[in-house]
Amino acid sequence: MDALSVLVLDDEKKIIDQIAGFLQKKKYQTFSASSPQEAFAIMEGQHIDILISDIMMPEMNGLEVLQKIKAEKPSIEVIMISGHGDMDSVIEAMRRGAVDYLRKPFGPLDIQLAIERTGKYLNLQNTLKRTQDRLHILENRNSLISRELENLIEKEFIGSSKAIRNVLDLALKAAEDKDISIMITGENGTGKEIIARIIHYASTRKEFPFYPINSSAVPETLLESEFFGHVKGAFTGADKNKHGCFVLAEGGTLFLDEIADMPVNLQAKLLRVLEEKKVKQIGGNREIAVDVRIISATNCNIDDLVREKKFRLDLFHRINTLKIDVPPLRERSEDIEPLISYFLQYFSRKKNLPVLRVDKNVITELKKYPFPGNVRELRNMVERALILRSGETLDLKDFNLNRLPLSDMPVGFSYNLEKQEIETIKKALLKTDYNQSQAARLLGVSKDALFRRIKKYHLEIRKELT
């Protein structure tokens, strides 16, 4: 793309001179303003790609400037400058659409990295617009996944809804940049890993490994070894050399699932690897160069975790160049019917059964159901219905739906995922008489992952817990 056009806004001349001077040396088209009024005048007469703006200014603060720009000139990306004591303002700026931040004091390398990250994002946005008409949509199917991708991934991400088309649109176009870091958010069971696989196999990295690792499923004591590897004798039980996931994913994609559960001390080490593109095994002296794309996923609100200092803001920015939010199934009920059709064919073929019809009342009732377990829950429903079938047509009885009107959820039911997780943990602990190992097995997570969630939600481990 052409040289980026950057406007620097700060009421301190020293800051303007520092940033503008560096950008001019790097051949960026550079403008500067000492007040918001002057900046808006420049933006009216000049094409600006990026605004670098201080948060604290006397005439109008940076958040107000950001809000006005996103309302009137949304194509301009904004990098905020923050002091030591205003992290809450930085988080609020990111929520309002800022793409990055520079924390004072900063140096030339910080400026360069921020501009490069934003430039990659702008380049991707331009690519999305240019390639809108070049997407290959599978013929006469409800899937947007190409035939080549169908052979490489699970085909459970099917749908005709606008929400799913937007997600798959963005995933396929994001794949065109092999290095951009991507954060996938969404509730459990929505298909975040499938989206990550689509991005990987649609990219030029498809000939190299797709390596998924779940931060919740690995015991905390082994996380560092899983990520970076170890040499023989590095610790008790290290009886041979082991490569970590960065080396195992070399050239391909490293998928970090449930990244919000990663301990803070490991977050710092991960950030360093992402910045330096080198790893050092536990007990080793040699650094190993690595080339991987990072795709992360979470069902948590990381903004809240950053505010609570449970997740590093600098790491969040590093892994969140592009965000893809996967909508829950209850928000795209028109996808239920094609999903049921796919699952019926899949399980019928797998179990060597005839493909059965589904009574239309089943579809009607399922469209009223909130699906807290999302697509994964629907998949299990279909498999169970095939096993319990009583005739050649699957009806409400086979789906076990006649026992409860799905449109009327129990009193006190909450769609809030965090509340559901807390209540599920409490019930598992009660059921196992507070035996954490048994509760973890019941929940399908490791004991360390359960312990981290107990600490995260400040749950008291006592018999009085209800």
Image (tube, grey):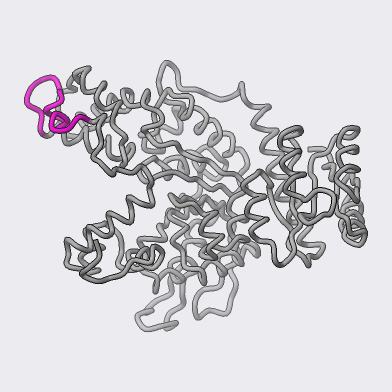
**In this view of the protein, which residue sits in the foreground, 298 or 274?**
298
Is residue 213 among what the camera can see? yes
> In percent of the image, x 79 and y 54: which residue is there?
54
Q: Position of residue 459 (x, y in %)?
A: 33, 66
Front residue of 131/110: it is 110
The segment highlighted magenta reads 388-405
Q: Say if the magenta span includes residue 206.
A: no
Screen quadrant of the C terminus: bottom left
Q: Main secondary structure of the magenta part?
A: loop
The residue lying toward the viewer, choosing from 249 and 92, is 92
- Tell which residue pokes out farthest to the left in this image: 390
Camera-side residue of 457 and 252? 457
Quadrant housing residue 13: bottom right
Residue 371 x %, y %: 31, 36
Q: Which quadrant, please, contains the N terminus?
A: top right
Reply above or below: 426 against 419.
below
Q: Residue at x 65, y 65 (%)?
A: 276
Q: Choose top left, top right, bottom left or bottom right for residue 434.
A: bottom left
Q: From the viewer's perspective, tell me whether residue 262 is left or right of residue 16.
A: left
In this rendering, would 263 be left or right of 47?
Answer: left
Residue 315 horizontal/vertical position (percent): 59, 60
Residue 352 appears in the rendering: no
Determine whether 332 is above or below 59 in the image. above
Question: Viewed as shown, does residue 200 lie left or right of 421?
Answer: right
Q: Tell me what residue is drawn at x 38 percent, y 52 percent.
A: 418
Q: Is residue 398 magenta?
A: yes
Question: At which x and y percent is residue 260?
Answer: 47, 58
Above-or-below relation of 231 to 312:
below
